[in-house]
Amino acid sequence: MPRSVQAGSTREEAADVFLSGLLFFDLGFTGLPSAPTPGAEVWTKGMGTSPGGIANFAVALRRLGLRTSLSAAFGEDLLGTHLWHELSVTEGVDLSRSRRFAGWPTPVTVSLAYDGDRALVTHGQEPPLGPDAMIGEPPPSRAAIAHIGAEPLEWVGRAHSAGTLVFADVGWDPSERWSPAVLEQLALCHAFMPNAEEAMAYTRTGTPRAALSRLADLVPLAVVTDGAGGALAVDSTTGESASVAGLPVDAVDTTGAGDVFGAGLVAATLAGRPLADRLRFANLVAALSVRRIGGAAAAPDLAAVDRWWRSVRDSPGNDDLRSAYAFLDHAVPAAATTAAGPHPADQPEQ
């Protein structure tokens, strides 16, 4: 087994959100005229790099003002060193629960964006330690984000017992079996946030709304995202149901948009917003993120959210948006409105 190294401060501070999942180095190409074909060379109009995977959640949450603690495997290679510095120093994510492994290569994903969507090519190996072995007893936190799969996660039960709100995420099943056993893990979760394709596949239903109805029987907060189509949700803890439309935006790269949506949903839930406002806020931060390359790198901060809101509020027209997003007058901290200069993620890709 590759040698592991734990880094970080000796005193662990309480976090708003604890996260566990796979980390990737993302390399994205945008503006492809068509899909690559064997024997041909395709020149792109844009390229960028970014922390990916669970880092999309961690960085988005941090930029929205929440203290985040991440448990993830990093290779002791060039890419792993770069990602560790980017997350811990540049973004301020707590990595005291993460590990670096010598001899284990940091996973890499290449994203190819064309025709309004993207294709992914990934290289990686299973981490030397699984989530439960790395985490042990999860740290105190208001919320946690867990990537559920075929194998149940013991740490999720411990977090649930400690009163942490667990938000479950799920990924594409390469086997395409979509085992319903995965959904059994939702008994220990507060929320489940699949996209429409995943939700319909796991519930064996034919529409996003039918999938939502099934999931609402399994978890207190069920949310189904549908890309540019928006999102719909049911919250049995408040008795609310809501469906909101997506925001029109010139998308450059949709990589990580679902993760940024999830981060916005967690942030708005912890802020105690009504369900419709939670969905609108999550939709907004996801829409702002797709204007640039990458997931984590493109995640907006609160100042970017506030600038978008002021541009909508102070421009003629936009009556529907002004009405729907009026809650942002009170949802963005005053400190965010005085941030010096725009965040790079607030600027559309050229």
Image (cartoon, helix red, strand yellow):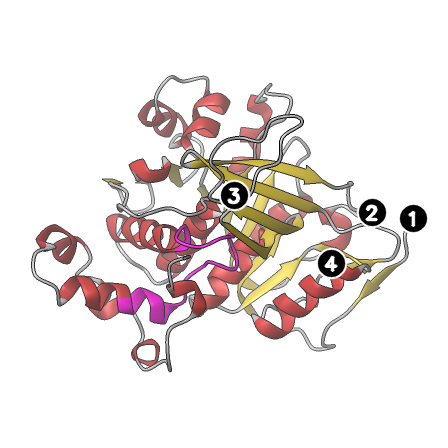
Q: Residues within 10 Å of mark 2 (few under 14, many from 20)?
A: some
Secondary structure character of the magenta stretch overall: loop
In the rendered structure, which amino acid carries the disc numbered 2?
A: Pro
What distance separates the C-alpha of mark 2 from that of mark 3?
23 Å
Quadrant location of residue 228?
top left
Which image quarter is the C terminus in?
bottom left
Mark 2 and mark 3 lie on one chain; the one further toward the N terminus is 2
Mark whose residue sits in front, 2 or 3: 2
Q: Foreground residue, 61 or 319?
A: 319
Mark whose residue sits in front, 4 or 2: 4
Residue lying at 74% horizontally and 59% vertically, measured from the top left: 80
Location of mark 4 (residue): 79
Q: Residues within 10 Å of mark 4 (few under 14, many from 20)?
A: some
As drawn, is 104 to the left or to the right of 268? right
Asked whether 305 falls inside the magenta stretch, the response is yes
Give the magenta part as a residue range.
Answer: 289-307
Mark 1 touches mark 2? (CB < 8 Å)? yes
Tag 2's secondary structure?
loop
Asked whether 11 falls inside the magenta stretch, the response is no
What distance separates the C-alpha of mark 4 from that of mark 2?
17 Å
Q: Which mark is residue 101?
A: none
Location of mark 2 (residue): 128
What distance separates the C-alpha of mark 4 from that of mark 1?
20 Å
Mark 1 and mark 3 lie on one chain; the one further toward the N terminus is 1
Mark whose residue sits in front, 3 or 4: 4
What distance separates the C-alpha of mark 1 from that of mark 2?
6 Å
Residue lying at 28% horizontally and 51% vertically, measured from the top left: 280
Quadrant location of residue 88?
bottom right
Q: Foreground residue, 276 or 249?
A: 249
Image location (x, y in percent) of residue 194: 46, 36
Residue lying at 34% horizontally and 21% vertically, measured from the top left: 207
